[in-house]
Amino acid sequence: MGSHSQNQIVDLERREVCWVKYVNPRRFECWRWDDQFVYHAVDHALDGDSDESYAFTDGRWLPRQLRADASAAAPWTLDVSQNSIVWYDASCHVVPSRSYAFPYRLRAWIEPGFDAGGDLGRRDTLVFDYEPYDPSAARPGERERFYLGLGAGWYEWERGGFVILFNRLGGPAISMNRQAWCGGGR
């Protein structure tokens, strides 16, 4: 529970984890996995109350296993240079004007005994850094940072000095509206 009133849903059969946001079953973000990677599957939790969503054509997000010695000084890295973003309207139609090449860079490492705060306390934490970029631009995109605690899941998100915490236990269990998912999520 926290500032986005998130509810984490893990579906082992689908190999999927989703977070319902804003106490709204139509607002969720989902990641899926196979034996090699965890993939960003969909973001249907855009700011406001938009019925739009997006997905990535590549979507590799994290390796399924990370070296135990991965640190901030020597992180795991990946440049997803051949990715595109596919934008969907409320009727699940692709919006061509908003769908385009969308490369991004990733870094991940382990922070042992990191203080997750709230009800979670100290625990080993996977820190994940995501940076979209335009290869023709002079400056890279703004980074997002995700914190995932051992035995707790995703509990913190940062971008541009803005921090969202969901590190309190309890709160309402909210199911997601899977019918809202465009592009193969059903």
Image (cartoon, grey):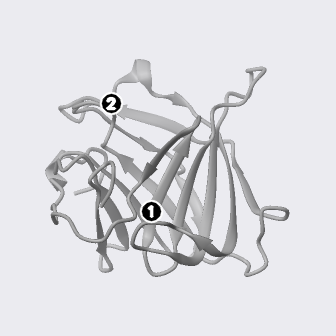
Q: Nearer the viewer, residue 50 or 90?
A: 50
Other residues around mark 2 within 10 Å, as few (<14) / some (14–19) / many (≥20): some
Please, which residue is most extreme toward the right here? 73
Picture layout, residue 6 above or below residue 121: above
Q: Secondary structure at mark 1?
A: strand
Q: Toward which corner of the image does residue 92 lie, by quadrant?
A: top left
Other residues around mark 1 within 10 Å, as few (<14) / some (14–19) / many (≥20): many
Residue 53 position, x and y percent, is 32, 37
Residue 94: mark in rendering: 2
Residue 52 position, x and y percent, is 27, 32
**Which residue corresponds to the image point at 54% horizontal and 61% vertical from the top-left?**
147
Residue 84 position, x and y percent, is 54, 37
Foreground label between 1 and 2: 1
**Which residue corresponds to the image point at 69% horizontal and 42% vertical from the top-left?**
81
Residue 155: mark in rendering: 1
In the rendered structure, which disc, 1 or 2, sits on the residue that comes first in sequence? 2
Residue 143: mark in rendering: none
Q: Amino acid at mark 2?
A: Val
**Which residue corresponds to the image point at 42% horizontal and 65% vertical from the top-left?**
32
Left or right: 15 in relation to 82: left
**Which residue corresponds to the image point at 51% horizontal and 72% vertical from the top-left?**
149
Q: Amino acid at mark 1?
A: Tyr
Q: Secondary structure at mark 2?
A: loop
Are the two marked residues, 1 and 2, in contact with CB atoms closer than 8 angstroms?
no
Q: Quadrant of the N terminus?
A: bottom left
Q: Toward which corner of the image does residue 47 lie, by quadrant?
A: top left
Left or right: 137 in relation to 85: right
Residue 42 position, x and y percent, is 37, 49
Left or right: 72 in relation to 144: right
Picture layout, residue 163 above or below residue 133: below
Picture layout, residue 13 above or below residue 81: below
